[in-house]
């Protein structure tokens, strides 16, 4: 039987033994599968942080969505025109000259009424918007399953609008 080792520096080996600390861990929520009729829908992801774009792109493709990516508002406007997304996930804190709000306003000015989910590290969300297609505000600190649960709602809203406009 091996004697218990107490945390701290060992006198014999010159090595440090860290104290055992229980780190609270909440396992991620399970991600609900995408309804069959929504698989293949195009999601526009706009985020200036490459890591977040890669994470979202990987998850969304795994869920069966087509993904259009942009790192700033100018690229997003081009991608939105070319790919006609059914929903957009937009970071509020995009680099100058146009943040997430500016992008939303420019999309509306160009006649694109794509539903938007703002996904941001910014800790304070606005109290409200007069745009009925802002589906929600999500913190990057929350479980991504909560973000993905909003996508079917947003896509169905997009399809209803497109059907009523035609």
Image (spheres, rainbow, N blue to C red):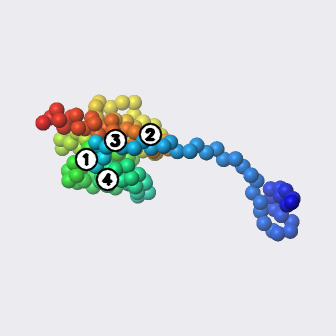
- The front one of 163 and 1 is 1
**Would you identify the image quadrant in which residue 36 lies?**
top left
Q: Residues within 10 Å of mark 4 (few under 14, many from 20)?
A: many
At mark 4, the secondary structure is strand
The reply to whether callout 3 and callout 4 are in contact (CB within 8 Å) is: no
At mark 1, the secondary structure is loop
Q: Residue at x 70, y 47 (%)?
A: 22
Q: Residue at x 28, y 49 (%)?
A: 40
The reply to whether callout 2 and callout 1 are in contact (CB within 8 Å) is: no
The reply to whether callout 1 and callout 4 are in contact (CB within 8 Å) is: no
13 in relation to 97, above or below: below
113 in relation to 43, above or below: above
Q: Earlier in the sequence, mark 4 or mark 2?
A: 4
Residue 15 appears left or right of 124: right
Distance Cα–Cα, label 2 vs label 1: 20 Å
Q: Picture coordinates of residue 85 (x, y %)?
A: 25, 47
Q: Residue at x 39, y 53 (%)?
A: 62
- The front one of 34 and 26 is 34
Residue 85, which numbered label?
1
Residue 146, which numbered label?
2
Q: Earlier in the sequence, mark 3 or mark 4?
A: 3
Counting every numbered tag in the picture gives 4
Q: Picture coordinates of residue 64 (x, y %)?
A: 34, 50
Say if residue 101 shows up in the picture: no
Residue that label 4 marks: 67
Residue that label 3 marks: 35
**Would you identify the image quadrant in which residue 35 lies?**
top left
Distance Cα–Cα, label 1 vs label 4: 9 Å
């Amino acid at each position: 039987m091996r004697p218990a080792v107490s945390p701290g520096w060992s006198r014999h080996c010159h090595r440090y033994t860290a104290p055992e600390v229980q780190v609270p861990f909440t396992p991620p929520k399970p991600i609900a599968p995408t309804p069959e009729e929504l698989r293949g829908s195009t999601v526009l992801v706009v985020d200036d942080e490459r890591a977040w774009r890669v994470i979202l792109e990987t998850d969304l493709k795994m869920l069966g969505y087509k993904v259009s990516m942009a790192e700033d508002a100018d690229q997003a406007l081009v991608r939105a025109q070319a790919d006609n997304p059914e929903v957009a996930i937009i970071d509020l804190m995009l680099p100058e000259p146009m943040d997430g709000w500016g992008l939303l306003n420019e999309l509306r000015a160009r006649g694109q009424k794509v539903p938007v989910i703002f996904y941001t590290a910014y800790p304070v969300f606005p109290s409200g918007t007069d745009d009925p297609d802002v589906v929600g505000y999500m913190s990057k600190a929350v479980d991504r399953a909560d973000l993905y649960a909003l996508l079917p709602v947003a896509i169905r809203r997009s399809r209803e609008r497109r059907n009523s406009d035609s």
